[in-house]
Amino acid sequence: MKNYQIIFFGGDRLSENGPLSRLCSFAKKNKIKFLIITDPWRINIKVNDNKKFKQTLKENNFEYICAKKINLKLLKNFVTKETIAFSINAIWKFNEDTINLFKGRFYNYHAADLPSEKGAGNYTWRILMKKKKNISINIHEVEKELDTGHILKSKKIIIPANKKLPFEHLSIIRKAEKSFLENFLIDCINKKKFSKIKQRESNSFYWPRLNSDTDGLINWNWQADEIVNFIKAFSKPYNGAFTFIKGKKIRIFNAEKIKLKEKFHPFQNGIIFRHYNFFIYIASGKYAIKISLSDTIGLDKKISQYLGKKFLNE
């Protein structure tokens, strides 16, 4: 069995060749021996150019193992007293035996703030909450509880007020994390001692993983700004917020709140009351919600047929 300097757990983000594959390319260029351990779900997600993560691994000749669970007996064959473990988008909750195998050299990259953005789906949760402060990316020690270990490296991120879609947040994070991760990797190989910052649990928030196909249902009884924000939060690279009309599921990726002189009764909420230049206008309390046909999947180009019809919550 081979011995490795780094064992990476996890995979790339949805619709992106990175961050793991980018870091592995850097490691390969610098002759750092590594192994990737990934899972059946992540190895089959679509990354950049609509190809699966598995194809990225094969094209780059990265050594990898795909496993539903961590096999500690097998893992011991790859680990020396110098081996470092680095989790990037891993789905597993690591047990104490796995953590202890690396003797304090087990780290996780969390592409969101700690401790205010623990958990998953952070870009969506952040947009839903209209959060503008305390945004950062972090590397922390792995403990048996998720996202609780001491922070070893952190970088503040500024998200401009006009960046309201997940892919815009991701674009900014992507630029910041490249050198952030590469420098940390080199520091690990060079056995740098890191200053450890304890997370303040009194300031922590934990949010669960989201699935656009089940969690993205629009409630047209919400206020207009809540609906618009919700639609933006589930936008690309995710599968979009969704609603139903005429028995058909419609995905929506962007929307705009429009002020009108008229005020709608709650009974009118969700009704398409106007179509104009490939835009539809939906009643929403004191406002209209304007949606471009190009920002939807499932609506027919003959949008006149939807006039007077109502988007449903189920």
Image: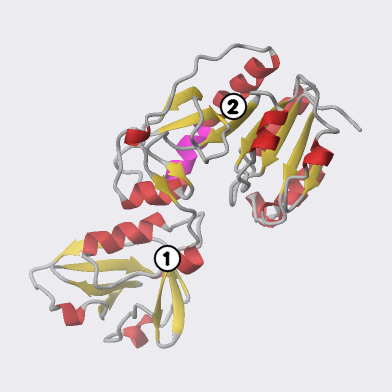
Q: Residues within 10 Å of mark 2 (few under 14, many from 20)?
A: many
Q: Is residue 13 left or right of residue 38?
A: left
Element type where label 1 sits in the image: loop
Q: Name the quadrant containing residue 199.
A: top left
Mark 1 sits on what residue? 216
For the point 60% across and 19% down, which residue is it?
183
Q: Quadrant of residue 232?
A: bottom left
- Horizontal arrangement in the rendering, residue 314 relative to residue 52 (left or right): left
Name the residue type under label 1: Gly
The type of residue carrying mark 2 is Leu
Q: Position of residue 78 (x, y in %)?
A: 83, 32
Position above or below: 256 against 14: below
Residue 172 drawn in magenta: yes
Q: Position of residue 65 (x, y in %)?
A: 80, 45
Q: Position of residue 300 (x, y in %)?
A: 45, 80
Q: Residue at x 77, y 27 (%)?
A: 28
Residue in front for this viewpoint, 151 or 11: 151
40 displayed left or right of 251: right
Under circle 2, the secondary element is helix
Locate the C terminus by quadrant: bottom left
Q: Tell me what residue is drawn at x 34 percent, y 80 percent.
A: 312
Q: Which residues are magenta?
A: 168-176
Q: How many marks?
A: 2
State the residue at coordinates (81%, 27%): 4
Q: Nearer the viewer, residue 314 or 255?
A: 314
Task: Please tell me whether residue 67 belongs to the stretch shown in magenta.
Answer: no
Q: Which residue is mark 2?
A: 181
